[in-house]
Amino acid sequence: MWSDVPAVPHVSLGRWADVVVVAPASANLLARAAAGMSDDLLTASLLTATGPVIMAPAMHTEMWEHPATRANVATLRSRGVQVIEPAVGRLTGADSGAGRLPEPDDIARLVEDALQPPARDLLGRHVLVSVGGTREDLDPVRFLGNRSSGRQGFAVVERALARGAEVTAVVGTVEVAPPPGARVIAATSAASMRESMLAEQARADVIVMAAAVADFAPERTEAIKIKKVDDRDPDPIRLVRNPDILVELVSHRSAGQVIVGFAAETAASEEELLSLARAKRERKGCDLLVVNDVGGERVFGREDTSVRVLGADGHVLVEASGAKSTAADAVLDEAAKLLPPLPPARG
Ligand code: CTP
C-alpha cells in the first residue's frame, strides 16, 4: 500500500472506481468507515472514493442490532453511503437471524442502479403497498398464519422508492426488514391490514396488494389460552370469512388510481394457471393481476420468482423471472403506463 509511492494505490483506487462495493461489510469495517479511518487500503480507498459507495453488511444479529452499529449505519447513510439491509437467515455457525450477507443478485441490482440510475418515472406519485402475511389470533399464544416472507412486497417498495415514489408500506408478518425510506405501518391481522389500507387509499396513485391476506379468521379469539382436556377431543375451530381488501379498494377507487393484485396459484399447467388468474382478475376488478405459480416450494420465502402480469382484458402484458426486484420493476412498469399524467407543477 505504501511502498510504490508514485502510484499511491491508497488514493488511486478510490478515484479510479466508478462505484465501490464492500461485500461483506463487517461491524468493524462499518465502524472504521463511519469514523473516517484510513489505515489500510480498503478504508483509505473509501475516503478517496469519488463515486457511489455500497455496503452489504454481514455479521451476527447482536452486532447488527447493537446501538454502536446502528449509529455507524446512520452516520454512513447520512453521508450518502448506501448500506443495504442484511438478509435474514443462516449465519456463520449454528446461528440464524438478521445479519446474513444480502443475496448477490440484490447487490448486483444496486450496483447497476448506481452506475445507471433508474428513471425517476414515479416522482411525485404515492405508492401504497401491502406486504407479508397476516396472523389471525386463536388465543393469546396461538394464531393461524401463512408462509409469506414479505420479500416480494418489499421488492415493490424498494423499486418504487428507487423510481422516485413516496411509498407507504402496510406490513403484516415478514421475515425481512423493510427497505429504508418507506413509511411503514404495522398491521398483523387481516382486519388491521384492511383498516390501514382503506385509511391510506385516498392519497395513493398506485396500490399494490402484495400481501397474502388470510381468507378466514377464527370465529372467536379466546381471551385466555385454550387448554387441552385429557379425555376429550379438542373443540373444532370455526372459521369465518375475512373481507376481501382488494375488492373493497377497487370499489372505493378514485379516478386514475391504479390497483394491482397478486395471485399465488398452484396449477398443473400454464393454461390452468392463466385461466385461474383471469377468473381471479375479473372477480377482484383490479387493473393488473400479478400471477405466480407457488406449487412445490417454488416461490414462498425464496429470493427469485417468475411472474406474469395480466391486464384488465385478461392478456399477459409481460412476463418476468429472476430476482423479486426484477418482477417488481415489471409490475411498476405496467402500473406507470396506466397512470394519468401528473398535473403541471404550480408556481
Ligand atoms: N386479498 C385481499 N383480501 C383478502 C384475500 C386476498 O385483499 N381477504 C388480495 C391479496 O392481497 C391478493 C389478491 O387478493 O392481491 C389475491 O389473493 P388470493 O389469496 O390469491 O385470492 P383469493 O380471493 O383468496 O383466492 P383463493 O380462493 O385462490 O385463495
Image (cartoon, helix red, strand yellow):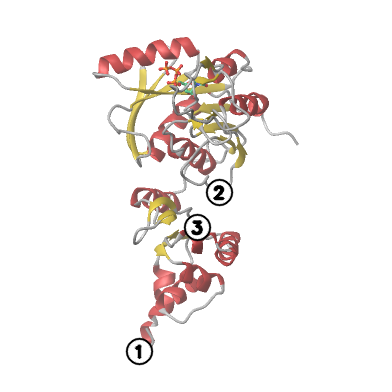
Crowd class of label 2 (few under 14; some 14 to 19; many from 20; radius 10 Å)? some
Crowd class of label 1 (few under 14; some 14 to 19; many from 20; radius 10 Å)? few
Q: Is residue 38 above or below residue 102?
A: below
Mark 1 or 2 closer to N-term?
1
Residue under the point 56% across and 18% down = 219
Residue 180: mark: 2
Report x, y in % for residue 190. Answer: 56, 26
Q: Name which quarter of the figure residue 247 lies in.
A: top right
Report x, y in % for residue 174. Answer: 49, 40
Q: Is residue 314 visible?
A: no
Q: Nearer the viewer, mark 1 or mark 3?
A: 3
Residue under the point 45% across and 10% down = 282
Q: Is residue 225 visible?
A: yes
In the image, farthest residue toward the left: 269
Q: Name which quarter of the figure residue 187 lies in.
A: top right
Q: In terms of depth relative to the viewer, which is nearer, 2 or 196?
A: 196
The residue that label 1 is drawn on is: 3
The residue that label 3 is drawn on is: 83
Q: CA distance from mark 1 to mark 3?
A: 32 Å
Mark 1 or 3 closer to N-term?
1
Report x, y in % for residue 34. Answer: 55, 70
Q: CA distance from mark 1 to mark 2?
A: 41 Å
Q: CA distance from mark 2 to mark 3?
A: 9 Å
Where disc 3 sits, the SS reads strand
